[in-house]
Image (tube, rainbow, N blue to C red):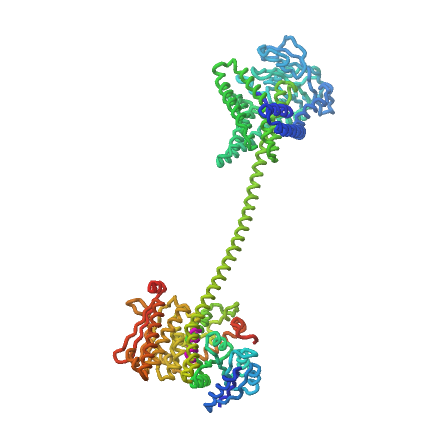
Amino acid sequence: MKPIGWGLYARFNALFDVRFKLKPLSARLKNDAAIMKHTLMQCAASAALLLLVLGPLCTPALAIEANAQKANRAAINTVQSSDFRAYTVFDKAEFTQNKSLTPPREAQWAAVTLPDSWNINKRDRSAGFGWYRFRFSHQGEHHDGYDALQRALYIPRITNNVEVFLNGSSFAVSGRLAPEPENAWNRAQYFLIPPSLFKLGENELLIRLHPDGFLRSGLSKVYLGDSDALSHFFEQRYLIQTTAPQIITGLLMVMAIFSLAIWAKRRSETMFLFFSLMALVAVIRLVHYYLRTTPEWLNFLAVPSLAWLTFFQLQFSFRFANYAMPRIEKGLLIFTVVSSLILLVLPFAAPAAYGNATAIIYLLLTLSAPFLLAALAYALTRERSPEKMILLAALVLNSALGLHDTLAYQERLGFDRLYLLPLGLPMILFAVAALLVKRFVATLSGYEALNADLARRVAEREAALQSSFEQVRQLDQQRATAEERQRLMRDMHDGIGSHLMSTLALARMGSLSNKDMTEVLADCIDELKLTIDSLEPVESDLLVVLGNLRYRLEPRLNVAGISLEWAVKDLPPLAYLDPENIRSVLRIVQEAFTNTLKHARAKRITISTGIDYASNRVLVRIMDDGVGLEERTGLGAGANQAREDQKYCGRGIDNMKRRATKLGGTIEFTALKDSGTCVNLYLPMTLTTLTTAAT
Amino acid sequence: MTRVLIVEDDAAFRDRYAAILAQDSAFEVVASVGTGGEGMAMLDLRKPDVLLVDLGLPDISGMSVIQHATKTLPKCECMVVTVFGDEEHVLASIEAGAAGYLLKDASEENFLEGIRELIAGGSPISPIIARRLLKRFQADAPSPAPTAAIAPGSLIKIAEGDSDIALSSREREILLLASKGFNYPEMGKLMGISPHTVTSHVKKIYRKLAVHSRGEAVFEANRMGLIRTL
């Protein structure tokens, strides 16, 4: 495992950014100023973030070391029985190398200082195991042959495994030593020492170090003393080195699945796909920090995964920023694919070159990191938003941590320096989480706004409808009123008006007798009553209409000595009986009455109603027992009167026919066998028939 | 001797009514006045048996005079004299307590006949009025609510089986026949009763309508614009 970061410090980015941009943009100097501004702001943000985030994060790690340095350095042999919190830190040891698994008896011991890095001190790994010897004097109290204190051995870092001996007796190993040694390179060691192994006076602690063929080898400082105090150091370091990466692995997995699910539903948002892939690749790398044994395929994948991680992170970040730099993206993709192919093929084709190839690829990635970070910083700061700033901070932080780890790996910061890169990964999760929260809230707010808007629009439409309904209603009313007025006007004009006019003309000429005048006026009043009755809503009931006419006319018929027989039968409702049509019917029947009254000398009138099933029509029959229609002409006092009568009758009959046709009906006049006339008025049942008949 | 009070603002009509009544010695005109106020005063003073009243009086509505009469003189028969005998006026008068109506243009015979019939216990009814009454009582009769409730624009609901104001089946039949245009003798023949019984039934129906609509009389009359005060 090679924890090489993909970034350098942000202040380098500024320089790279400027150069990177100056070349293609030489003609656009104005833009350069903007870019410079971006870069400077990014520098400031990065510095602040480094102080704010990295500081507290590293504190516990650094504190362990600091505490250790400041701790009670008293040698174990000076420990008093009253001082239970004492330990000693060995920063010097004697060293020898051989291939024996048992402690060497005769050997050349050389003094070394701890930590002892085999790379830096150029020790030969093929020369066998490394033996470190520590001597100390012990004067602890014994109770029943046991030391009063439980003592422990704490070693912050070993590479790769150790076996420890006290006074010639082995009491612990750091992990499996054979056949395949386990990984312990990033795992602090803590061994309880059996009290019986301590001797009064001189004691000898031996550590046999198993170097690793590939990894760095070496031994950090060694802590010996009270188990409580040392376990505290151990737990803190274990938290950072093992537990935290484990938790972060879980987090990454959850987020990877979550965002993969989002992408599955929203294919266009490839940001979530790339985030998911990035998290998965990060997990591949992360598990190496704490797994004691890793499967071979995982190791195999881990090497090219850095390029993929860089690629996915770039893709994700660009999409997060809603910006694209196709050439950079394409270039990185080509590099990633080519390097992966090389790393996958090389172990089989040319195993010897594998190490160098890896180193070159990692170096190229490291060198490109500032450029990429600068490009991302530019993309993320074009349109500011809190979650983009979080992502930018995360990228900068991870770059810083990557740089730290690179330096640590190169042992520039001390052999037992902690690796911090895993701790920076959750920051990227925060950025995604912030984005999702923002979207969720925006969606909810959007829905609320939409609902409010909809409600408002519905209310507006309702009001508009209401007012248009109101307008229509008013128009209807106006139209109805106008029609009614027109109808009444026509009525007055044709009926009572002309009646009064002709009477007035006759009266002026003095040719109107008192009796005639009374008759004309009575006619006028009848006319008025008829109009009034026609206004009564009868709801399609023709019998009511006819009955009322009878009620009006019967007193006058009785006075004239005519009896009226009422032989009506129930009729179906006639839906078309509006005032106009009612009046037409009334006029027809009234005309028939008048004819009989004036000219027929009848004693009896029979009115009957029924249904003519043959033609599916309503029948109204007015029958009298007077003289027939033909004979009426000769009834007048003289020839003139007779002609007048004929004319009058003819006009009356024409009017009746016209009105019946208008109603969609017909009227028939029949002379009865013995004497008298029968008027048959046929009316349609429905308006449809009416319209058909009318046209 | 039937004592008649005439309340009519047109002097010509007053004189005509008086002249017609004078033809029959059974009638005595106790007073003939031109305003509602005078009419009410004369009602209190002369206590007539019959009141002939015009609806369009100059001071107050004839309806108020009728109401005054029914309140103070329960035995006094009120007759409205109308121009057209149209339903709005006639129904409103009946609701106010009138037992019948006469047309202003009625012949002398018809005029006297109308008053005689009224005194004998009969009231006239036109098909349109019969139909109106049918509808009005039908709207109330099937009401399932046992308690009275007044809703705006509706009539007072009548408790089922309340014989004082609900229509009997015979009364309903009479209204139905009347709405089809049959006159009293024909109805009597159809129903197997005397014409006189028919007309007294009609008078009872009118009284029920008056009781029936007393509660909403104010509302109804105001809606019609026929009365100003009560």
- Of the 4 image quadrants, the one containing the C terminus of chain B is bottom right
Q: Is residue A240 magenta?
A: no
Residue A683 lies left or right of residue A137; in this view the side is left
Identity of the residue furthest to the front in this view:
A509
Q: Quadrant of residue A680?
A: bottom left
In the figure, A433 relative to B45: above or below?
above
Identity of the residue furthest to the bottom in this view:
B25
Q: Position of residue A386 (x, y in %)?
A: 61, 35
Q: Is residue A522 magenta?
A: yes
Q: Position of residue A133 (x, y in %)?
A: 66, 14
Residue A256 lies left or right of residue A556; in this view the side is right
Q: Position of residue B219 (x, y in %)?
A: 53, 71
Q: Residue drawn at (62%, 25%), measured in percent from left and top?
A: A18
Q: Nearer the viewer, residue A298 or A202?
A: A298
| Helix, strand or loop: magenta stretch | helix
In the figure, A3 relative to A682: above or below?
above
Residue B64 lies left or right of residue A57; in this view the side is left
In the figure, B172 relative to A558: above or below?
above
Q: Nearer the viewer, residue B188 or A156?
A: B188
Q: Nearer the viewer, residue A113 or B203?
A: B203
In this picture, which residue range is highlighted in magenta? A521-532
In the figure, A272 relative to A114: above or below?
below
Q: Position of residue A154 (x, y in %)?
A: 65, 22
Q: Residue drawn at (48%, 61%), measured in percent from left and top?
A: A475
Q: Nearer the viewer, residue B152 or A284?
A: B152
| Residue A423, visible in the rendered structure | no
